[in-house]
Amino acid sequence: MPIRRLSESIVNRIAAGEVVERPASAVKELVENALDAGARRIDVTVRDGGQSLITVADDGHGIPRDELALALERHATSKLPDDDLWSIATLGFRGEALPSVASVSRLTLASRPRGAAEGWKIAVEGGRLGGVEPAALSEGTRVEVRDLFFATPARLKFLKSPRTELDHAVDWVHRLAMAHPHVAFTLGDGARTPVRLSAALSRLDRLAQILGRDFAENALTIDAERDGVRLTGHASLPTLNRPTSREQYLFVNGRAVRDKQLLGAVRAAYMDFLAVDRHPVLALFLEVPPAAVDVNVHPAKTEVRFRDSGSVRGLIVGALKHALAAAGHRAATTVAGQTLASFRTGGYGGYAAPASLPRGMTEAAAAYQAPLMQAAPSLPPAAPEPSVETDVQPLGAARCQLHGTYIVAQTSDGLVIVDQHAAHERLVYERMKASLANGGIKRQGLLLPEVIELGETGAARLVERQAELAELGLVLEAFGQGAVVVREVPALLGQTNVSGLVRDLADELQELDQALSLKDRLADVCGTLACHGSVRAGRRLAPSEMDALLRQMEVTPHAGQCNHGRPTYVELKLADIERLFGRR
Ligand code: ADP
Ligand code: MG
């Protein structure tokens, strides 16, 4: 065969293979175009997972009539003003998206520039351009993509279920929406509208719209700079975590990226606070001088390359660690626990005036004294001194609960502080294991069955595992589209946050190998179940409940640490307390 030039339509179709991997990538490209056009409102439709129809309508600056045909030509763009690939300020720049999508679908591009009296449209089918015709539309642009991949049947075969493809499209719209909080977005499939985002006032508002109020209330604010690179955003406290890293959103100069190196930096920062199989929720935004980053690695533009990746990693790890260290008491207890451990191993000996105590100890002392003193007035006036038989009750007698989270117990020669949530989690795990081995887990019916909206993928995933979940004590069934109804829960959980539990499980199942039974992954599943049990942090416990928890801990194997490897309690001997006060 002689060498010949490939036709434009073949070239476009080859490019489409890279740019338009699946319907969601077409949605992404079209929404990016709308954002580049300065849209304040973007409405997306995705029918049959995007296979039969995708539309993206915006109120941006529009395309003049005489540029409509050009917009569909390969390598035609309005966005590379100085032909400078090192100073890219827009999401698009390659001039490939429209021609690529058009080459594998039936596409109509309609637009009415701002201030223009009328709109015009042009249609392309299998790469062949039609003529420009008048179109009725308000100011802005509307792209309609029908029968995506009809021209490339091989690609059609790789598409997942419409539900999964829709989920991918939703995910992309969410990502773009996070980076553009002031823009309003909707995404509907004709029947439902899984994305409905009004223009948000701030980035945190937008994140709350997408990730939930829970996130907004449990997020640390990140703001750091190094070598001209700025990192901002919000990251969850370690206590708000997920079984997968799916809810970690990373952006570089407003562009959503999925970069292994950056995800690795996040993992490193949280390493001391989370078990390897738990992941924080976060949205981080890097602002990098355009010349210090290359977004031109791949046509889909989701990979980036930094000139100094070590420095970027350092910035992320440092900023997150700093914010975590400055944050709440969950981290502080770990630190205190380590400090206390060093007391007992004799790392500190002899008398020292309190003023000269190492810093960590002084803080530990303060951390433990302050809450005790606050709690004192609410103790019963004449609480009898409990008699504790240390041999039988090494964890002592419960005296009070602090901050709805910690149980303070008096032992014969000191005190024990229990993290009730962590302890409970461990107990649930060990008991589930034992009951499974002994003929099954007891279930408890819900007075009111609870309906939980999960999106179609999540719901289907749970329903598929219905029988296995029932074995673990969780009885649920499908409820209309994208929801499940929960009828029974494992009895040993007590009062449960059913919706949080089921959501987490759905997440978890996504990661789980289909071939593995839930029993094989019991540790993970139980961890998720227990996380939503009755004794979770924040709940007030009656004295008898506190004592019951201590007694259970004493007879449960491995009760000294929770499923994530954190301690469930710390012990302070009287001798240690005396040292803290310089009495020894
Ligand atoms: P790129 O975005 O890389 O420039 P595209 O093929 O996505 O390439 O788009 C080609 C051109 O069409 C853009 O540069 C822009 O001028 C125009 N265009 C595409 N979509 C829109 C839109 N929604 N609003 C205004 N102009 C658009
Ligand atoms: Mg584009």
Image (spheres, rainbow, N blue to C red):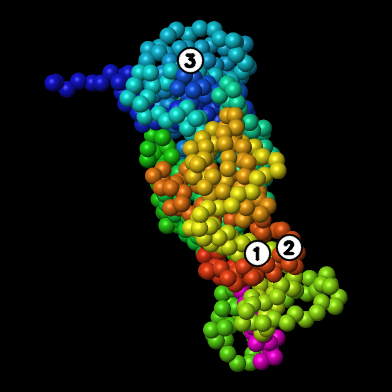
Q: Residue at x 52, y 45 (%)?
A: 469
Mark 1 Cα shell of 10 Å, populated few (<14), some (14-19), many (≥20): many
Labelled disc at residue 474: none
Sequence order check: which comes first, mark 1 or mark 2? 1
Depth check: give the residue in front, 349 or 9: 349
Q: Residue at x 47, y 27 (%)?
A: 162
Sequence order check: which comes first, mark 2 or mark 3? 3
* Kind of residue indicated by mark 2: Leu
Q: Which residue is mark 3?
A: 108
Mark 2 Cα shell of 10 Å, populated few (<14), some (14-19), many (≥20): some
Q: Is residue 359 visible?
A: no
Q: Is residue 392 visible?
A: yes
Asked whether the residues under the numbered discs 3 and 1 touch, taking CB atoms below 8 Å apart as contact, a structural biologist would say: no
Q: Which residue is mark 2?
A: 541
Mark 3 Cα shell of 10 Å, populated few (<14), some (14-19), many (≥20): many
Stretch of the chain drawn in magenta: 570-584
* Kind of residue indicated by mark 1: Gln
Labelled disc at residue 420: 1
Asked whether the residues under the numbered discs 1 and 2 touch, taking CB atoms below 8 Å apart as contact, a structural biologist would say: yes
Classify mark 3: helix, strand or loop.
strand
Percent coordinates x, y for residue 402 in the rendering: 73, 67
Sequence order check: which comes first, mark 3 or mark 1? 3
* Kind of residue indicated by mark 3: Thr
Classify mark 1: helix, strand or loop.
helix
Q: Quote the CA–CA distance across marks 2 and 3.
A: 63 Å
Q: Quote the CA–CA distance across marks 3 and 1.
A: 60 Å
232 above or below 476? Answer: below
